[in-house]
Image: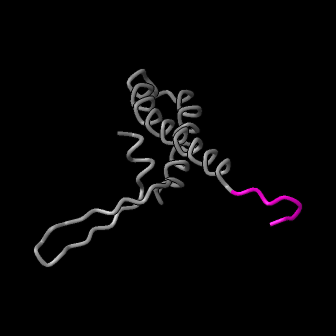
Amino acid sequence: MLTNIISYGATSYTVHPIDIRIVYIYPGIPYYGNVGMIALVAFLYLKEILPKSEKWNSDNNYVFNMVITPLLYNFIGILLLKIIEILQAPIHHGMWV
């Protein structure tokens, strides 16, 4: 399911006269991937800083782990897709593009 979320970011719907819906799926990284990366960095920062607070307990640690884990999977997926995208790019020999 995570692969579907990462690799099928953009979809569009078309309604035909007899009300049949066709879904076009465009592979790629979702547009909100950057927001996920900002959230991952913010939560990692908070998890590093907040344990020094007097209100920190093990429940807070559990919640932060639940939040950070899917964001980390999302980051790894985006990173792998970017690497694959770079490896599949055409190579221009002898010229700078």
> Residue 11's quadrant in the figure?
bottom left
Question: Please, is residue 95 above or below residue 28 in the view?
Answer: below
Q: Position of residue 72 (x, y in %)?
A: 51, 36
User: Is residue 95 rendered magenta in the image?
Assistant: yes
**Farthest top residue in view:** 58
Q: Residue 65's image quarter?
A: top left
Whether residue 45 sits left or right of residue 92 in the image: it is: left
Residue closer to the observer: 90 or 52: 90
Figure colour scheme:
one colour
Instruction: Pick the residue in front: 5 or 55.
Output: 5
| Above or below for 11 versus 45 | below
Please tell me whether residue 35 is drawn above or below residue 53 in the rendered image. below
Between 50 and 54, the one nearer to me in the picture: 50
Where does residue 75 sit, x and y in percent of width and height?
A: 54, 42
| Magenta: main secondary structure | loop
Residue furthest to the bottom: 17
Counting from the top left corner in percent of width and height, residue 15 is at 20, 73
Q: Residue at x 46, y 32 (%)?
A: 69
User: Could you tell me which residue is drawn at 42 percent across and 36 percent down?
Assistant: 67
Percent of width and height locating residue 62: 40, 25
From the viewer's perspective, is residue 2 above or below residue 17? above
Residue that appears at 27% across and 68% down: 13
- Asked whether residue 44 is drawn in magenta, I would say no
Q: Quadrant of the C terminus?
A: bottom right
Number of marks in picture: 0
Q: Which residues are magenta?
A: 90-97
